[in-house]
Image (cartoon, rainbow, N blue to C red):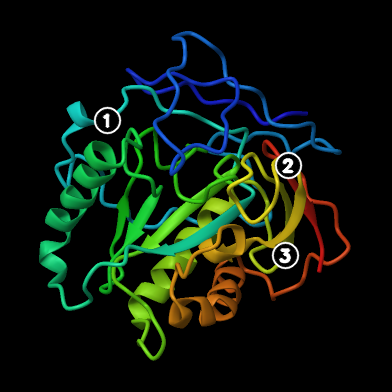
């Protein structure tokens, strides 16, 4: 049984499939009315739907997320169509490579500047990251299309489909402390997004590259941690040595938030396979 698809928000068009999207150039224009692909067949039926929602073993409450409207994103700047995968099977962690000495009250202005740069100067059609997190632990909605939906971003060339990009606001080179509030917020966000598809944050996934500019030739299937760094998929220093070193702790935190000990799913078959993502164990 495939996961049911939610109706697209007003003004948003679903896409049948998407390439590895920017940072390799502007998004292609999708024809209105084209239906999104259903999630790949699951192997066994999902539990019956209750009055509220489907109870999957790794689902956790959605964390508080500051919306695009709240940080005053100018919606006239972006591509009016969002693009969707069948689900989210992995998370890529980034940093914005911006100064660390900011006041958290000024983050909305920082987001607007990033938004302008990525739409006007880089022609990515929108913010590349699906979400951004500041040093105070506040989570912001990045790319448009619905925070709870599998929106295809422009964050990890070759591996944008079926993944979510979370950017830590700041620069995290060697010796830089990663704020605990930021770390916990990233873990909570990853636990929620991965939990929607029943994904273990400490597990492994297989992703298929859609672009030769990634670390893997187009069409190559490669194993990734369910929570990986940008540099795992692309030749870059992002998310910075310090933040990359914290990824094991973030995976453990996310697994704990899902209400299970790390590695508890070893040897089990997961129940959903979004897009070009294949799950496996360590």
Residue highlighted by disc 3: 203
Q: Is residue 224 above or below residue 65?
A: below
Q: Is 216 above or below relative to 182?
A: above
Q: Residues within 10 Å of mark 1 (few under 14, many from 20)?
A: many
Residue drawn 12% across the image and 55% down it: 109
Alpha carbons under labels 3 and 2: distance apart: 14 Å
Of the image marks 3 and 1, the number of the one nearer the N terminus: 1
Q: Is 71 above or below relative to 226?
A: above
188, 172: nearer the viewer? 172
Q: Secondary structure at mark 3?
A: loop
User: Toward which corner of the image does residue 243 lie, by quadrant?
Assistant: bottom left
Task: Tell me the distance, in whole angstroms, between the alpha carbons under discs 2 and 1.
Answer: 31 Å
As helix, strand or loop, the secondary structure at mark 2 comes to loop
Give the mark toward the camera: 3 or 1: 1
Q: Residue at x 55, y 81 (%)?
A: 249
Q: Which residue is mark 2?
A: 272
């Amino acid at each position: 049984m495939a996961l049911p698809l939610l109706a697209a928000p007003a003004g948003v068009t679903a896409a049948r499939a998407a390439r590895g999207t920017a940072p390799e150039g502007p998004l292609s224009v999708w024809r209105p009315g084209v239906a999104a692909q259903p999630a790949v067949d699951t192997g066994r039926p999902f539990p019956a739907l209750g009055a509220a929602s489907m109870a999957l073993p790794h689902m956790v409450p959605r964390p508080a997320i500051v919306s695009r409207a709240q940080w005053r994103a100018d919606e006239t700047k972006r591509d009016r169509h969002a693009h969707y995968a069948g689900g989210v099977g992995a998370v890529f962690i980034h940093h914005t490579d911006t100064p660390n000495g900011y006041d958290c009250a000024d983050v909305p202005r920082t987001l607007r500047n990033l938004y302008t740069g990525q739409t006007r100067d880089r022609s990515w059609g929108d913010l590349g990251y699906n979400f951004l997190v500041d040093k105070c632990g506040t989570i912001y909605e990045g790319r448009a299309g619905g925070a709870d939906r599998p929106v295809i971003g422009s964050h990890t060339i070759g591996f944008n489909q079926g993944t979510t990009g979370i950017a830590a606001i700041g620069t995290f080179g060697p010796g830089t402390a990663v704020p605990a509030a930021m770390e916990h917020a990233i873990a909570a966000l990853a636990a929620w997004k991965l939990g929607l598809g029943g994904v273990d944050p400490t597990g492994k996934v297989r992703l298929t590259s859609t672009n030769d500019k990634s670390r893997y030739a187009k069409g190559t299937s490669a194993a990734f941690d369910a929570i990986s760094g940008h540099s795992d998929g692309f030749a870059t220093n992002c998310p910075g040595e310090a933040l990359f070193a914290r990824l094991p702790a973030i995976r453990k935190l996310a697994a704990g938030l899902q209400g299970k000990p790390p590695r508890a799913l070893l040897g089990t078959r997961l129940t959903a396979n979004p897009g070009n993502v294949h799950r496996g164990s360590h």
